[in-house]
Image: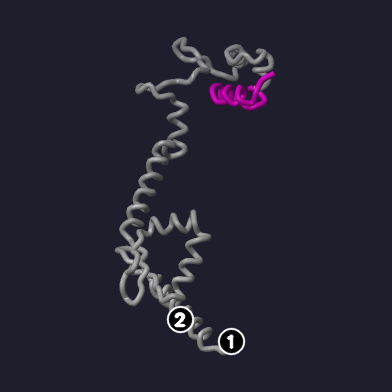
Amino acid sequence: MSTIEQIEKLREKANVTYEEAKAALDAASGDMLDAIISLEKQGKVEAPANGGSFTTSPQKNENGVEKQKQRKDKESGESFSAMMGRFFRWCCRIISKGNACMFEVRRHGETVLPIPVTVMILLLLFAFWAIIPLLVIGLFFGCRYYFSGPDLEKTGVNKVLDAAADAAEDIKKDVSGSDI
């Protein structure tokens, strides 16, 4: 009984159809070399020139790298280690940008607490159940939040945070001014 891997390998080496590869492997009881010899005798595979030989072991190029591995690397475009290196460089760039930018808590125009954006993101990811209520409560106690840094001052995020603080002030005025 021949396996699909054996059939694939024989197809690749002998350039025959699946049916021919399976029949040759079944006739040779799964022996790859006997299957190639059988196909050669049938005239479906040309004998190697100059008395060469067939092999089913991985071929190595002049640098000692397996040709199959080299072909897979070319097909995928780059190796796994190169992709991981690129990913880690991207992560380092993001973290350094996050450390250069700050999330600031301001009260009465003074910065009370500057936090790097990277730390703020980590806090939001791992302690959102505590951070989000604290941010909302801070709005009602007159805190305003701002982002500062080379990448964040160009965006309109500070306008949105000001609008949220103004909305909190309006709600606070409505609640304190109502007759309860």
Please report whichever mark, 1 or 2, sits nearer to the chain's N-terminal start. Answer: 2
Above or below residue 164? Residue 47 is above
Disc 1 element:
loop
Mark 2 residue type = Glu
Q: Residues within 10 Å of mark 1 (few under 14, many from 20)?
A: few
> Observer-nearest residue: 148 or 60?
148
Above or below residue 173? Residue 61 is above
For residue 169, the mark is: 2
Q: Quadrant of residue 117?
A: bottom left
Q: Residue at x 62, y 13 (%)?
A: 31
> Observer-nearest residue: 152 or 27?
152
Farthest residue to the front: give it: 180
- Horizontal and vertical percent for residue 85? 38, 41
Q: Residue at x 45, y 31 (%)?
A: 71
- Horizontal and vertical percent for residue 72? 47, 33
> Which mark lies nearer to you, 1 or 2?
1
Q: Which residues are magenta?
A: 1-21
Disc 2 element:
helix
Question: Mark 1 — residue?
Answer: 180
Give the CA distance from mark 1 to mark 2: 18 Å
